[in-house]
Image: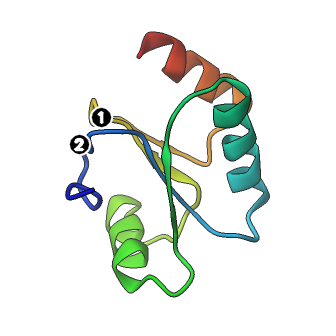
Amino acid sequence: MTDLYTRTPSQIVMYATEYCSDCHRAKAFFEANHIEYLRVGLEGNEQATEFVMNVNNGYRSVPTIIFPDGSILIEPGWKELQEKTSKT
């Protein structure tokens, strides 16, 4: 995917870490609702980490989820994900 580190990707991109419970919840939401997304791990990925910190004003907040319409959800709950994906 050539537009991986952009605020308008061609598909949903979730920047995450392995140890993050919020990331596991977002993954479970996407899978339960059959929503395609691309997961990008921050572990050992300096470019992904820098991108997330740029989007989040210097914070390494995960999950950071970027949608094709340019909207961004940071550490969203199930309800927030539901509201966002029902509009897209």
Residue at 29%, 58% in the rendered image? 4
Where is 31 relative to 66, above or below? above
Q: Amino acid at mark 1?
A: Pro
When the figure is inspected, residue 88 is found, relative to residue 69, above or below; the finding is above
User: Left of 83 or right of it: where is 7?
Assistant: left
Image quadrant occupied by the N terminus: bottom left
Q: Which mark is residue 44?
A: none
Marks 2,1: beta carbons within 8 A: yes
Which residue lies at the image location 67% right of the left edge and 43% below the top edge?
26
Q: In the current view of this chain or complex, which residue is farthest to the top?
A: 87
Amino acid type shown at disc 2:
Thr
Q: Nearer the viewer, residue 13 or 51?
A: 13
Residue 68's disc number = 1
Percent position of residue 27, x then y: 68, 45
Q: Residue at x 40, y 85 (%)?
A: 46
Going from N to C along the chain, the mark reached first, 2 or 1, is: 2
Q: Secondary structure at mark 2?
A: loop
**Residue that mark 2 sits on:** 8
- Say which element carries label 1: loop
Where is 45 relative to 56, above or below?
below
Instruction: Please tell me which residue is depicted at 79% across the width and 57% down the height of the picture.
Output: 21
Residue 54 found in image quarter: bottom left
Q: Position of residue 12 (x, y in %)?
A: 41, 40
- Neighbours of disc 2 within 10 Å: few (<14), some (14-19), many (20+): some
Image-based side of 38 in relation to 47, left or right? right
Foreground: 8 or 58?
A: 8
Q: Position of residue 64 (x, y in %)?
A: 50, 53
Image quadrant containing the C terminus: top left
- In the rendering, at what x and y percent does residue 66 appear? 39, 44
